[in-house]
Every structure is written in structure tokens, then in C-alpha cells.
Image (cartoon, rainbow, N blue to C red):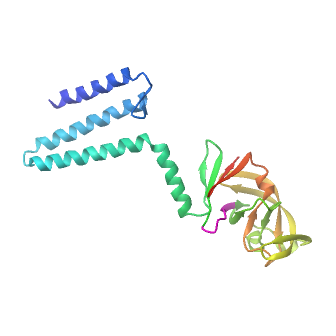
Amino acid sequence: MLFIGAAIVIAIGLVLLIVSDAGTLIGLSQDQFGRLIPLVAILLFIAAGLFSRQRYRLGEMMGNLVLWAGIFGVALVGYAYRDDLSGVASRVFGELVPGSAVVDAERGTATFRSGMDGHFTINAKINGETVRTIFDTGASAVVLSHADAIAAGIATQTLRYDIRVQTANGTGRAAGVTLDRLEVGGIARNRVRAFVAEEGALDTSLLGMTFLSTLTRYTVSGNSLELVD
């Protein structure tokens, strides 16, 4: 009887695949639905095993069947909406780890979530060193704080701070440099022009236009920032 039941399930699945002229069934393609048929067969075996254990009372058996049906239903819904759930997981990750990118390698995008202060904090790799920056379209160039420049291996003691810049701390001076490599969310650029602010002039480095202008586009929508390579 068990094998007959499994055969019936598989036969029904094949019929549904054949008559599904719209190409999809319950949100799944024919190929995807076909891969679910073995799972249904496995569920049938489990259910049969439960019935074969005579020491179970009817209520216990029904409870177990409902539990397994619920697990199977959740798995089916999760599989059908896996793309949407992946997006939700990415947004949660962005909220929990500010500055970290949600990378879509196929589309060449990096997405960031804004912090409680409304700013987009972005963890960039400068000359291989992770540097916390703020997305700033008002900055004409990438601007590094004095401490971040040292961390990135720039010899700040040899720089000439002869460029006047306006920062959150007021008017200061900066020196022009060229960064060997700047990478943000998997988007990498070599030989990027930047400034290094004199000591005490800037608290947090700025991701400015000498990097942003090399992108295909950057889009701010609500509390989400998307960079496109």
C-alpha cells in the first residue's frame, strides 16, 4: 500500500506538470515543482511510518501528521518566495551591521542602509585597510582623516597640507594624494585621487565624488543606498 501511495503521488505530480499550460503552478516553474515531488513521496513514507506504530493513539498520530504537514508547508512557501526572503534577510543584515554592504555580484551592486543619524556609513577598503567612511556627494573627492590615512599606509609626515577644505569641524587644510586601491562592496578602483585632512580637521573619512563619479550610478531611496558598478 505504501508503494502504491507513493506511485499515486508521483503520478499526480506528473499530470499537474503536463496540464500546467501557464508554465507555473503555485508560484513554481514546472522544473521546480518536479523537484518537489520526491519530497512529497518522502513525507508519505514518514506518515506511513507513524501509522505503523500501533502504540500511538489516534490523537498523537494526527498531531504528528499536522506537524509534518506544517513543516512541509513552511518549506514550500520558503522555497517559492526565496528571492523575497533573501531581500528581507539582506535588509536585516544591513540594519544589524551598519557600514557593511549587501552585494549582488550578478547585478554588480552594493546596497547600504542608513544609520540612526540618517547618514550612510560605508566600510571601504583603502590600500587593503578597512576604513569607515560616510557617503558624501558634497565632497568633491575622497577625503581621509589623518588617522585613517596612517592606517592605510600613507606617509602623512611627508605631505604638504596646502589645500583649504571645509569640514564639519570648520575650515582646515588637506594634502592631495593618490590611493593605490579603493574598494567598496566589491566595487574596486585603482589610482583614486583623494585628500588627507590635517590632524584634528576631520573625524570620519568621506567617500566623495572621485570615487562616486566612476560608478554607473548611485541611488538613494528612503534609507537605502545602492551603488552600481
Q: Is residue 50 left or right of residue 17?
A: left
Vertical comparison of 1 with 119: above or below: above
Q: Nearer the viewer, residue 41 or 13?
A: 13
Q: Is residue 30 magenta?
A: no
Vertical comparison of 97 with 191: above or below: below
The residue at the point 55 percent across, 61 percent down is: 95
Q: How many marks?
A: 0
Q: Is residue 174 left or right of residue 32?
A: right
The residue at the point 11 percent across, 41 percent down is: 52
Vertical comparison of 229 with 199: above or below: above
Work out which residue is located at the far bottom of the displayed protein and give it: 200
Q: What range of the chain is rendered magenta? A: 116-124
Q: Is residue 122 magenta?
A: yes
Q: Position of residue 133 (x, y in %)?
A: 70, 65
Q: Nearer the viewer, residue 136 or 155?
A: 136
- Quarter location, residue 3: top left
Q: Position of residue 158 (x, y in %)?
A: 88, 72
Residue 128 visible in image = no
Vertical comparison of 106 with 14: above or below: below
- Quarter location, residue 51: top left
